[in-house]
Amino acid sequence: MSQEEDRWVRRSGKRIFAPTTGYRVCTRCIMDTSDPEIVFDENGVCNHCHDYERRLAAEVYPGIKGKQQLAKAVAQIKRDGAGKKYDCILGLSGGVDSTYVAYVTKQLGLRPLAVHLDNGWNSEISVRNIENIVTILGIDLHTEVLDWEEFRRLQVAFLRASTPDSEIPTDHAIIATLYKLAADHDIRWIMDGSNIVTEIMVPATWSHGHSDFGYIKHLNDTFGGAELKTYPHYDYYDYMVRFPHIQRIQRFPLLNYIDFNKMEAMEIMKRELKWTPYGGKHYESIYTRFYQGYILPKKFGFDKRRSHLSCLVANGRITRDEALAEIQKPALSEEMEREDRVFVAKKLGLSDAEFDEIMNAERKTFWDYPSSERNLPGTETYKKYITASQYHSGEWTRMTVARLNSRLISMRSLHVRALQRMRRIHINPMEAVTSFGRFAKRTTANTGSSLLRNAMKLTIPLIRPVGNFARSTMSPEQFARFKRFAQKMYAGGRVEPAPSSPEMKEPV
Ligand SMILES: [Zn+2]
């Protein structure tokens, strides 16, 4: 890539300008140009800092407000789960976030079903941690064991595809399993461990396509060699329509509603749940540890610690200098790096040479392959999904009701406005109605009337009030002029006021 070319990267499938030439780091956090799409404002503050603040204000409810919102949500979850074995479901990896979600869920008096995905990479500590957690908290645990041969091929396929998305097969399977079990047990709520406080700053370029089975399937079919048969998955229809609207399963980001302090959470977990730390975020899985600590930084230049540390800086848990010092340390010790590399390559069935080939292959991105996200939007199928989700979510009904309602309101105000106007020009509404009745009777009797005459007749009930009004506000000369004009006009319309109709009177 030439230097000029390097300044252009893909964002959402389009090439956009992003100044990636020259190293630059945010002045507030430690995110840097290893995110090719990073942009800095005039003070050198990056888009992740701005995103973080925006989402923090919109989605995180700490303090009293959070307590109230949480109490409301918990009451709803309990109502929805009444008479059922479980009222919510949660994914349990054994890591800090998911363990703390399990702990808080239990503290709130909910009855969760915990789900653990065994993709074959659990570290011994994580297995022990999970056992301790469910035993001490008294939670039922469902362990979903993936077909190892199939999953191994899928992981190798992702590595061969050379995109930075190799954690997606695991993430996708967890979500699919959670929704499937929720539906099986008629559970309405998923307690979600993802949270803005520690996770939001991961750039989209570092990993993309978590919900995209089209992408996963394509990579598997191209680089994996055998069909996916048992791998838990879902597609865009499930994601947009079936899960949220037909099965009505909702995700609740629990950690956004409490004052989530990771250090404190870890202390509580160590003390009360016999939980042992892993020495790194998401290092409960050996593959994750090696992927995030070796493959991602060495091959792609992405160090996930950078975004995790930036989050800690953004919410004031550590200083920027501390984060900068921390990121200088190697993610894995040399010894662990060597051990993990041998272990991972062997487990995946890759020879040393094959592994080197993967590490040296040209880097690709999500956008280099077919996927649902790339192929679906704008198509008829996609429009159908959108319509279906609007229909099922009741949005269509809400829109119709809102339309009718606004029409009703304008009608109501029309009648109020009419009454106000009548009062202003001294019309007694009751009298007007009676006059109109008389007029209607005459009009129906006189079927030969011209349109103009009918229109003129419509105003007959107004003659007296208008006359009275004119007389009270005009000078005698003006009134005489007005009266002459009115008489001429009515004569032109050939309307003879009926004997019973009110007549204009001479001014006093
Ligand atoms: Zn920043």
Image: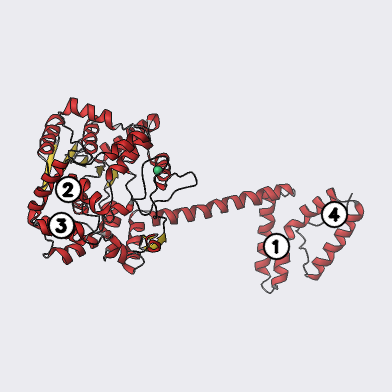
Q: Nearer the viewer, residue 88 or 494?
A: 88
The residue indicated by pointer 3 is: 356
Mark 1 or 2: the one toward you: 2
Question: Which numbered disc, 2 or 4, marks the residue that appears first in the sequence?
Answer: 2
Mark 2 or 4: the one toward you: 2
Q: Is residue 462 left or right of residue 253?
A: right
Label 1: element kind: helix
- The numbered dot on residue 505 is 4
Image quadrant containing the N terminus: bottom left
Residue 502: x percent and y percent? 77, 56
Image marks 4 and 3: residues in contact by CB distance under 8 Å = no
Separation of residues labelled 1 and 2 (CA atoms)? 70 Å
Residue 154 in view here: no
Mark 4 or 1: the one toward you: 1
Other residues around mark 4 within 10 Å, as few (<14) / some (14–19) / many (≥20)? few
Question: Which numbered disc, 4 or 1, marks the residue that appears first in the sequence?
Answer: 1
The residue indicated by pointer 2 is: 181
Other residues around mark 3 within 10 Å, as few (<14) / some (14–19) / many (≥20)? few
Mark 2 or 3: the one toward you: 3
Separation of residues labelled 3 and 1 (CA atoms)? 93 Å
Q: Nearer the viewer, residue 26 or 385?
A: 26
Q: Quadrant of residue 222?
A: bottom left
- The numbered dot on residue 16 is none
Residue 52: x percent and y percent? 39, 42
Q: Nearer the viewer, residue 87 or 381?
A: 381
The residue indicated by pointer 1 is: 458
Question: Which numbered disc, 3 or 1, marks the residue that appears first in the sequence?
Answer: 3
Separation of residues labelled 2 and 3 (CA atoms)? 39 Å
Residue depicted at x 16% and y 29%:
273
Residue 102: x percent and y percent? 21, 35
Q: Where in the image, quadrant-wise, is ligand 1 located?
A: top left
